[in-house]
Amino acid sequence: MTDTIARPETTPELPGQTVTVKRGKTKHKGLGIDRRPGFLTYGILIALFAGGTYPLWWSVVVGASPSSVLSQDWPPLLPGGQFWTNVAAVFDTIPFWQALLNSVIVSTIITVSVVSFSTLAGYAFAKLKFRGSNGLMVFVVATMAIPTQLGIIPLFILMREFGWTGSIGAIIVPTLVTAFGVFFMRQYLVDVIPDELIEAARVDGANMITTFWNVAVPAARPAMAILSLFTFMMAWTDFLWPMIVSPQNPTLQVALSQLQSARYIDYSVVLAGAVLATLPLLVLFVLAGKQLISGIMAGAVKG
């Protein structure tokens, strides 16, 4: 038996004739594959978006309402008109602006330090050949498996011996370098920068620092943007270590914990303060959203 393959008829192109090609929808009829997102895809995305934004929206609703709404059978779904009253209570209870300044200083210094050292170390592990580099990288990765809580007591004793307890320096110094940042930048740079490009820079007379600044840094900008955002977010929301080492000079998260007392918790005031503490992160993600998406896409294409 001979199989007959149907071929589409083609019209020969005549001199001076313009041929218009119509492209249809991308669909493989034989396999039943349609590349267009369907209702199920949109439904899953909407459900994920609603689940992710609901806690923030509920904080806004309760933070703008009296605390009595929590005892209602059907709590409101829209914010009330008491937000600024609750905000005023936050300002009267805690040193909000000083705590906000402390959080900005701590998060900014930690972010700049982590990104700088991680990019330098990641480039060294990825592209510089030196004795013991693999073993040292294994040691760096192994430290990521150690729980952070195990180092709290030794770090606190060390900060006390230095006389730094009660200052924001005790919050900053232990987190100036992170093993995750070094590992993240190393994994990104190991493939994104060809070895031939580094050799070409050396042939042109560039030294190690010039090669790093002119070759590695431009290539690492997408990963640096992602690491900056997540490092700033982790430093901004950190509570345990600042609470232990500097409760007298608190960051914003520690100051918010002072809104509750041993006998009574006004959840409307607490959530109003939480909304205020979340606003800087939202503004940061809105402003840096383009860099975040480009970094994620660059990593996806590289992988």
Image (cartoon, helix red, strand yellow):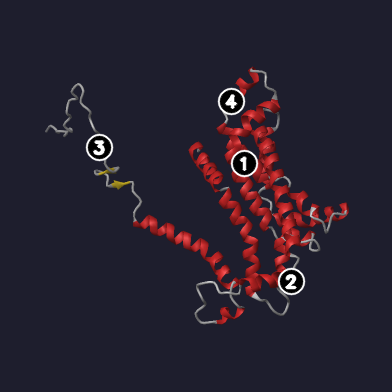
Give the residue drawn at x 68%, y 53%: 235
Sequence order check: which comes first, mark 1 or mark 2?
A: 2
Tell me: 298 left or right of 284: left
Viewport quadrant of the N terminus: top left
Q: Amino acid at mark 3?
A: Lys
**Label 2 Cα crowd, 10 Å radius (few <14 / some 14-19 / many 20+):** few
Q: CA distance from mark 1 to mark 2?
A: 39 Å
Per the image, the residue denoted by label 1 is 224
Q: Nearer the viewer, mark 1 or mark 2?
A: 2
Q: Nearer the viewer, mark 4 or mark 2?
A: 2
Residue at the outermost left position: 1
Q: Is residue 203 visible?
A: yes
| Displayed quadrant of residue 274 | bottom right
Q: Amino acid at mark 4?
A: Asp
Per the image, the residue denoted by label 3 is 22
Q: Amino acid at mark 1?
A: Met
Q: Are marks 4 and 2 in contact (CB under 8 Å)?
A: no
Q: CA distance from mark 4 to mark 3?
A: 44 Å
| Displayed quadrant of residue 92 | bottom right
Sequence order check: which comes first, mark 4 or mark 3?
A: 3
Per the image, the residue denoted by label 4 is 195
Q: Nearer the viewer, mark 4 or mark 3?
A: 3
Front in this rendered view, residue 85 or 201: 85
Sequence order check: which comes first, mark 2 or mark 3?
A: 3
**Label 3 Cα crowd, 10 Å radius (few <14 / some 14-19 / many 20+):** few
